Image (cartoon, rainbow, N blue to C red):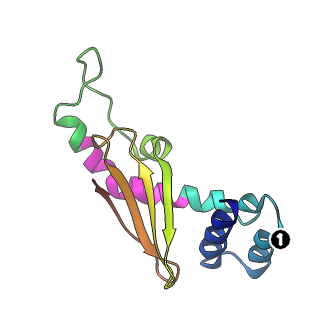
């Protein structure tokens, strides 16, 4: 499993990390931190939150209340980004990828998908399921 994650990190890092960082990923046991993988996690979360926070608030306005029946607080881009968790990362041979996130019930338990390519970067964020 770790080798698959490291391979994904190498592909993602090749988009904007230097060759030295890619080499460190291949050589380091804890390579995810060495290549700045967490930096990519933050960028993907920020992209998803920028694209989908307004939609999350629309869903919330359509009858989602807390356990006491009180209206939920507005979702900010920062809170959105902090609530989503990667559930799957897939990259094909052409460098196209999808990063799937659990939605923390902001969209009624749908999945959030950020898609793009290694060459073109993040292109879209949407919900599915």
Q: Residue at x 49, y 85 (%)?
A: 94
Q: Quadrant of residue 127?
A: bottom left
40 lies left or right of 26: left
Residue occupying the point 28% across, 56% down: 128
Q: Is residue 50 magenta?
A: yes
Residue 109 point in image, percent of width and height: 32, 42
Q: Residue furthest top?
A: 68
Residue 67 drawn above or below residue 16: above
Q: Position of residue 34 (x, y in %)?
A: 77, 63
* Quadrant of the rendered image containing residue 42: bottom right
Q: Quadrant of residue 112?
A: bottom left
Foreground pick, 69 / 103 = 103
* Residue beneath disc 1: 27
Horizontally, is 64 left or right of 13 in the view? Answer: left
Foreground: 57 or 105?
105
Look at 80% across and 78% down and name the residue there.
20
| Mark 1 residue element | helix
Q: Is residue 67 above or below residue 105?
A: above
Instruction: Report the residue at 64% width, 63% height from top.
Output: 5
Q: Residues within 10 Å of mark 1 (few under 14, many from 20)?
A: few
Instruction: Give coordinates of residue 111: x percent, y percent.
Output: 35, 51
49 falls in the magenta region? yes
Residue extent of the magenta highlight: 43-57
Determine whether 59 is above or below 42 in the image: above
């Amino acid at each position: 499993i770790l080798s698959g994650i490291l391979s994904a990190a190498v592909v993602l890092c090749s988009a904007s990390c230097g060759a030295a960082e890619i080499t460190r990923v291949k050589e380091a046991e804890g390579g995810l931190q060495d290549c700045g993988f967490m930096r990519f996690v933050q960028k993907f979360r920020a992209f998803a939150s920028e694209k989908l926070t307004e939609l999350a608030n629309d869903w919330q306005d359509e009858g989602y209340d807390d356990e006491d029946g009180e209206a939920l607080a507005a979702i900010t881009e920062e809170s959105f980004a902090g609530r989503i968790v990667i559930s799957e990362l897939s990259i094909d041979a052409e460098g196209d990828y999808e990063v799937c996130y659990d939605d923390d019930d902001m969209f009624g338990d749908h999945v959030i998908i950020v898609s793009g390519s290694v060459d073109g970067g993040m292109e879209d964020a949407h919900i599915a399921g």
